[in-house]
Image: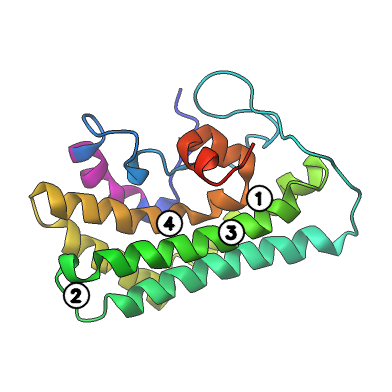
Amino acid sequence: MRLCRTRPALLALLTLVVAVTCAGASSALAGCAGELPDKNQPLTTATTGTGGGAVTGSTTSTTESQPYELSDQVASLWAESVQKLVALLQDTPPFASVQTAVADLKEQYVQKMVALGRQIIKLDPADQQTIYDRATDQLSAMDGATWFVSYKNLYDQYSAGSDDASQQFAIQLSSFDTLIQYAFFNVLKTNDPDEATRLSIE
């Protein structure tokens, strides 16, 4: 049973590139392991793969407003990253000329999400789940935003290339849709353990 989910607006968008590349791709391809689990699955258990996935780290009680503030920050950072990506790809320049800039932009927001994640992991599991649920709901509500539609259109244009390099770049673009997993360490460790190790997330 498939427990991962892609947000509905990108499900069709990602189908082609995942089908083309994931079967034979290495684990380094972010698009193959970049989905978030169903938000109805608790963060305190692993939702993909095998083995345990319990949230680790100390837990602290928090005010009622803190989970909402943190979830808003996660959603806001994600929206900002996609809008900056769209601006970077204005006029659809050749992907070879922007690939490094796109990678740098993603890493910038990875680090910002990880910084939020270090706050989130200190909270009790119920608060972590609240933050995750609220953030994913906020992302779903942005599917109709003009900038998100532009993001999907850009993906369509760049993924139209049939060569390997074009498909790799399309995967790189699609990985922005799941940047929020970097704020939820248990999700990241399940979906992309190599990235968790790179970022010293235990």
Q: Are marks 3 and 2 in contact (CB under 8 Å)?
A: no
Of 194 and 63, nearer the camera is 194
Q: Could you say where residue 135 lies in the image, as x and y percent from the top left?
A: 62, 57
At a point 56% along the width and 68% down the height, the residue shown is: 77
Three-letter amino acid code of the residue under disc 3: Met
Q: Which residues are magenta?
A: 11-20
Q: Which residue is mark 3?
A: 113
Establish if 186 lies above or below 154: above
Q: Looking at numbered disc 4 in the image, what kind of residue is underneath it?
A: Asp
Where residue 146 appears, x then y in whole percent?
39, 77
Q: Nearer the viewer, mark 3 or mark 1?
A: 3
Q: Quadrant of residue 201?
A: top right
Task: Assess disc 2: are there few (<14), some (14-19) or many (≥20) residues with their C-alpha within 10 Å of its C-alpha.
Answer: some
Magenta stretch secondary structure, dominant: helix
What residue is pinned by disc 4?
177
Give the residue at mark 2.
92
Depth check: give the residue in front, 201 or 146: 201
Query: Residue 188's x, y, as percent?
Result: 55, 41
Marks 3 and 1, how far apart at CA: 13 Å
**Kind of element beneath mark 2:** loop
Give SS at disc 3. Answer: helix
Of callouts 1 and 2, which one flags the residue occurring earlier in the amino acid sequence?
2
